[in-house]
Amino acid sequence: MKIIAYTEPTENGLLIHYPTKEIRSEILHLYQTSKEKYNGYFKIDIEKPYPARTTGEGSQNNKFYALVTELCKVTGNDIEDVKDALKEKAIKRGYPYRVNKLTGRIRPASTTEVNTLEMSYLIEEAIQECAELGIPAE
């Protein structure tokens, strides 16, 4: 589960304000599960939030799709196949993914779910792929 929350320091630690009741119930469920299986311990990653990937003219989204289009022209591959391959390769740079619990396969995140930093990993991967194929990318 990934949430964006407001936090503030207190005398006894850190107070986390979560945005909805649904998230509260998910957190309580996670706590109950971890209480039963791991004596109440669970992992919390705290990081600064980045804005969502940019869209529109001159955006990260446009840059990525321009690169993908060029890769498709040169390789003859389908746009979805090229996007999927780039996402899989960008995981090594830090592009987010999930693991399918049934198959164990890695499923890279959709570009609609990523932030500006994560989208930059994907663009860097596309630029590298273009460079390897002799496609001007800048």
Image: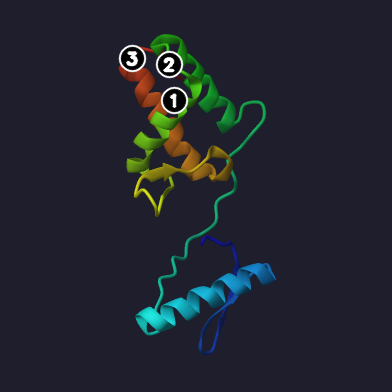
**Badge number at residue 77:** 2
Q: Please give the residue where the numbered disc 3 appears in the rendered image.
A: 133
Q: Quadrant of residue 26?
A: bottom right
Q: Residue furthest bottom?
A: 11
Question: Where residue 31 sits in the image (x, y, percent)?
Answer: 49, 78
Q: Please give the residue where the numbered disc 1 appears in the rendered image.
A: 81
Question: Where residue 52 sits in the image (x, y, percent)?
Answer: 59, 45
Sequence-wise, the earlier of marks 3 and 1 is 1
Horizontal placement of 83 versus 113: left or right?
Answer: left
Horizontal placement of 131 versus 109: left or right?
Answer: left
Residue at x 41%, y 75% (from the top left corner): 42
Looking at numbered disc 3 in the image, what kind of residue is underneath it?
Answer: Leu
Q: Residues within 10 Å of mark 2 (few under 14, many from 20)?
A: few
Question: Where residue 9 sits in the image (x, y, percent)?
Answer: 55, 80
- Front residue of 32 and 110: 32
Horizontal placement of 79 versus 22: left or right?
Answer: left
